[in-house]
Image: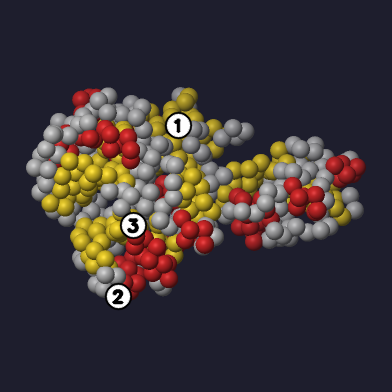
């Protein structure tokens, strides 16, 4: 399972990459693999104020629908409209081109509540 | 329970789910790709979990005519017909296909989850001279579906296949084994259902998936394919609490003969079913899921029974029971998806109209 070492993670399978005060958010490789072919993505609007663990986006596959939660609080400053048009980008490149939205953090200390790569890896069920 | 192909699916990396008590592959390389490959080329589905019940005896045809909604007496040898098994109040115990092998010998091909209850129900309703045998464990079933199925099968087994009309079947010798090959399926595409001894399952499977053009397809694609065709799935569109009168304008029901459950179904068809099964085309790609309520200007008008993204329509699609007055194609409705309401348009079935099941031309007849 592909897990970038310098990202942070939530137990609901979002990843976060921090640059300065901006948190880029997506769903993990594990999450996209569990969902399989994504067919629909709904993103928050730019300028939405969100709190950590708010439901802010939706990802759907043929068989399943899943909410995406804000890992940190702040203001949505950018969304990836390409994945709305082509949800399979998230399947192909969940940690890169398949990012979902960026949050300008209002409480940067919330990062400390997120898992690092080792913790996230350990939290995943054993592969069958 | 496991089909004879369980380990073959696992070896292919299939994602397995429990379906009607059976460990079945939901997908191999992905539902979307498998779906589109069946629409454009050919897919093979493990359907060994389905049941085959053999009914024999001089009064078998009469007994079956009294038990299922379609007409059995005038089936030709080598012909099969789709129908419903009902209880006295008209609710659906199963949907099935009835095959005639001889004047006095039939198969009923039934759903996996209802196989045992069907067997008991049918056994208790037969004449003393009619025998019933559950042959499901001894028989494997593979569905080969898609517009190139015939050429792909002929190449895989290096034999010409018999010319078969839609819902006709024959015995063919494939790889040294006598198989029942039936021009039927549940995808809307030209294709076959193959029945043969269970011990040949793995050999046939390997041969088919190794053949050029044929790819394995799982239950996920089977579900999206049948959804686009508006074919009902037992447990979703069909069940014991509802008669089949609202499905397909009462097709597959022959009211001219007596059968268990006929009177309530006849009454409902004559006064017009209260709810009809219709297609919904959603405004976007977000799916309406089973159980979601459907609303029109006048309030709640129905409920979604199946729904997902429809790969060949490039939008989300659903099947729903809608009150008859609102069940007109073009009618705009909204589906309650929890946090939001999804706009949808009522559409006639099938939703996908380029299927090749009946032939390369689209023909309009029953």
- Against B364, residue B307 (above or below) is above
Q: Classify 10 Å Cα crowding around label 1: few (below 14), some (14-19), many (20 and above).
A: many
Residue B244, position in %: x, y? 30, 34
Q: Earlier in the sequence, mark 3 or mark 2?
A: 2
Q: Nearer the viewer, mark 3 or mark 1?
A: 3
Q: On the image, numbered disc 1 is attached to which residue?
A: B303
Question: At 44% across and 65% down in the image, what residue appears?
Answer: B215
Say which quarter of the image contains residue B258.
top left
Q: Label 1 lies in what chain?
A: B
Label 3 to label 1: alpha-carbon separation: 40 Å
- Against B101, residue B288 (above or below) is above
Residue B242, position in %: x, y? 34, 29
Q: On the image, numbered disc 2 is attached to which residue?
A: B158
Label 2 to label 1: alpha-carbon separation: 48 Å
Q: Are marks 2 and 1 on the same chain?
A: yes
User: What secondary structure is found at the residue carrying circle 3?
Assistant: helix
Q: On the image, numbered disc 3 is attached to which residue?
A: B198
Residue A27, position in %: x, y? 70, 51
Mark 2–mark 1 CB contact (< 8 Å): no
Say which quarter of the image contains residue B354.
bottom left
Q: Earlier in the sequence, mark 3 or mark 1?
A: 3
Mark 3–mark 2 CB contact (< 8 Å): no
B61 sits left or right of B305 in the view: left
Q: Classify 10 Å Cα crowding around label 3: few (below 14), some (14-19), many (20 and above).
A: some
A103 sits left or right of B40 in the view: right
């Amino acid at each position: 399972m592909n897990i970038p070492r310098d990202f942070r993670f939530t137990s609901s399978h979002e990843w976060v990459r921090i640059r300065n005060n901006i948190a880029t958010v997506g769903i993990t490789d594990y999450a996209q693999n569990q969902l399989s072919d994504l067919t629909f993505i709904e993103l928050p609007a730019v300028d939405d104020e969100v709190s950590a663990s708010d439901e802010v986006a939706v990802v759907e596959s043929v068989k399943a629908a899943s909410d995406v939660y804000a890992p940190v609080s702040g203001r949505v400053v950018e969304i990836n409209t390409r994945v709305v048009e082509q949800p399979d980008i998230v399947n192909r490149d969940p940690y890169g081109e398949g990012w979902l939205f960026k949050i300008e953090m209002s409480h940067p200390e919330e990062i400390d509540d997120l898992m690092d790569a080792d913790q996230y890896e350990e939290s995943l069920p054993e592969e069958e | 329970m496991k089909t004879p192909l369980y380990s073959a699916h696992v070896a292919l990396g299939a994602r397995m789910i429990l379906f009607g008590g059976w460990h079945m592959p939901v997908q191999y390389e992905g539902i979307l790709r498998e779906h589109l490959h069946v629409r454009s080329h050919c897919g093979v589905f493990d359907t060994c979990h389905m049941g085959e019940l053999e009914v024999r005896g001089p009064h078998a045809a009469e007994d079956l005519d009294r038990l299922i909604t379609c007409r059995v007496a005038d089936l030709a040898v080598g012909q099969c017909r789709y129908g419903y098994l009902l209880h006295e109040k008209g609710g659906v115990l199963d949907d099935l296909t009835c095959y005639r092998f001889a004047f006095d010998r039939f198969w009923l091909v039934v759903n996996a989850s209802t196989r045992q209850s069907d067997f008991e129900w049918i056994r208790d309703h037969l004449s003393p001279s009619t025998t019933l045998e559950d042959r499901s464990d001894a028989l494997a079933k593979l569905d080969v579906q898609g517009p190139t199925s015939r050429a792909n099968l002929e190449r895989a087994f290096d034999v010409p296949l018999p010319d078969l009309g839609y819902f006709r079947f024959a015995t063919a010798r494939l790889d040294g084994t006598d198989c029942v090959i039936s021009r039927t399926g549940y995808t809307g595409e030209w294709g076959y259902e193959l029945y043969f001894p269970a011990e040949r399952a793995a050999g046939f499977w390997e041969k088919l998936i190794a053949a050029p053009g044929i790819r394995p397809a799982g239950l996920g694609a089977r579900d999206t394919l049948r959804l686009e065709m508006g074919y009902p799935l037992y447990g979703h569109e069909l069940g014991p609490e509802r008669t089949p009168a609202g499905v397909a304008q009462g097709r597959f029901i022959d009211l001219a003969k007596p059968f268990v459950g006929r009177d309530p179904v006849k009454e409902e068809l004559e006064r017009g079913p209260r709810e009809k099964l219709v297609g919904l085309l959603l405004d976007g790609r977000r799916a309406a899921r089973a159980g979601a309520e459907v609303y029109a200007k006048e309030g709640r008008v129905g409920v979604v029974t199946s729904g997902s993204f429809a790969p060949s329509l490039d939008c989300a699609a659903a099947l729903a029971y809608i009150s008859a007055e609102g069940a007109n194609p073009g009618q705009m409705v909204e589906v309650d998806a929890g946090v939001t309401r999804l706009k949808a348009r009522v559409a006639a079935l099938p939703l996908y109209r380029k299927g090749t099941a009946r032939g390369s031309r689209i023909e309009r007849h029953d």
